[in-house]
Image (cartoon, rainbow, N blue to C red):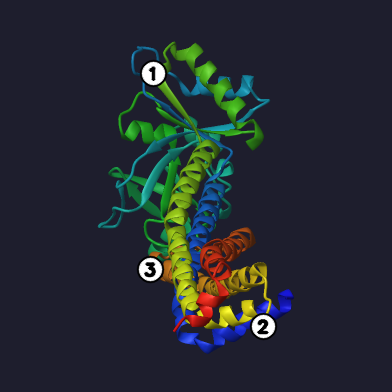
Amino acid sequence: MRFSENFSLAFGNIKSSKARTFLTMLGIIIGISSVMVIIGLGNGMEQYMTDSFESIGTNILNVTITGSGTTRTLEVEDMAEIVRENSECLDKFSPTVALRGRAKIGSESLSRTSVTGVGTDYFAINNYTLAKGRTLRYMDVKERTHDCVIGSYLDEEWYDSDALGKTIRIGGEVFNIVGVLEQEDDEAKEGGTDDAVYVPYSTAARLIRSANITSYTVTITSEDSADAAVDVLENALYDKLRSEDAYTVISMSQILDMMDDLLNVVITVLAIIAGISLVVGGVGIMNIMLVSVSERTREIGIRKALGAKERYILSQFVIEAAVISAMGGIVGIAFGYALSSLATWLVTALLDVELAVTPTLQSIALAFGASAAIGVVFGFLPARKAAALNPIDALRYE
């Protein structure tokens, strides 16, 4: 018997019991759509994290001086010397001093506005673009001036886009606004990247009465040399501070890699759990095929009495199980795409983030192949039972 004839018989039997066939395929449909959505969500989250880190800068190293276990300190000039002497892998640097919650405009306190003391290279490090005025200069840092640069949100929300030359109070002292940055976020909002004030780090250190700068942002010349740059910087810091506990160096690219690895583990576990429904679907196919064998026992007996060989009977029922499973796979893929689109809309609407649930072609091919394989594997036992029937017993079956 040709394969085409087996397929025709399989479709004929499926058409004769549409409701039962659909219920049998449900496990396959749910399993494939679940795997697609979970893997798609993982891809979306990975892309979202990559985009987020790229906006921050994967070529950035964050250095924190804790001073634990040593009386030595690191001056800004020391960090400048380290960067200068290792220019083959280190590029720019900027001290950072956090002053969150210290800004006021008139009588209004800006509790969510970030206020940061920075160096002159800070804006280039973060790829910030100047919209109006100027950024901070060397003399601002040297003379501890009360000049500052603000984000676009403050300019639009509080100064009607006319902030240059106006003032803002930080830590109880008046600062002159000398520059406004271009909008960084898709939407300028309170507490976002554009709701920020930048002052000279030397002035910020004086405001918080800190003798030493403990936080630095350093850029590397190439993302490919991130590990080497971390080693160089750690060795140089050890030479200055003489204690491995006195500093920490964190690479943004290393954090991204670790988060990607963790996310892949979580998504894999969830996909395996979702894949269990594929096995459940396979059991359903096996059960329905066993029922089908019982219902068609006389038909099998007649065919064997007319000369049909066991391998023909076997292939007929295996192909029928594979067709049911493959049909469930096709419906599952369509349903998975629909669920992915719905999930994208829900995540965007509820969490207000641009995250697309995007199943990959590899995951779709894997899911469809798995569904067809499950049909063959779980359809083999009923097919074997049908092929092994004694024609005389089958003809007597009521």
Tag 2 or tag 3, which sits nearer the N-term?
Answer: 2
**Count of labels in the image:** 3
Residue 296 appears in the picture as rendered: no
Residue 92 to residue 295: above or below: above
What residue do we see at 49% from left, 61% from top? 35
Instruction: Give the image quarter of residue 311.
Output: bottom right
Q: Which residue is identified by label 1?
A: 245
32 or 197: which is nearer to us?
32
Q: Nearer the viewer, mark 2 or mark 1?
A: 2
Question: Do residues under tags 1 and 3 come within 8 Å of each other at their CB atoms?
Answer: no
- Mark 2–mark 1 distance (CA, rounded to whole Å): 74 Å
Q: Amino acid at mark 3?
A: Leu
- Mark 1–mark 3 distance (CA, rounded to whole Å): 42 Å
Q: Amino acid at mark 1?
A: Asp
Q: Horizontal and vertical percent for residue 228?
A: 61, 25
In the picture, the quarter occupied by the N terminus is bottom right
Q: Which residue is identified by label 2?
A: 8
What residue do we see at 30% from left, 47% from top? 101
How many other residues sit within 10 Å of disc 3, few (<14), some (14-19) or many (≥20)? few
Residue 12 to residue 237: above or below: below
Tag 1 or tag 2, which sits nearer the N-term?
Answer: 2
Q: Amino acid at mark 2?
A: Ser
What residue do we see at 66% from left, 78% from top? 7
Q: Which residue is identified by label 3?
A: 350
Q: Name the secondary structure under disc 3.
A: helix
Q: Horizontal and vertical percent for residue 322?
A: 59, 70
Q: Horizontal and vertical percent for residue 162?
A: 47, 63
279 or 344: which is nearer to us?
279
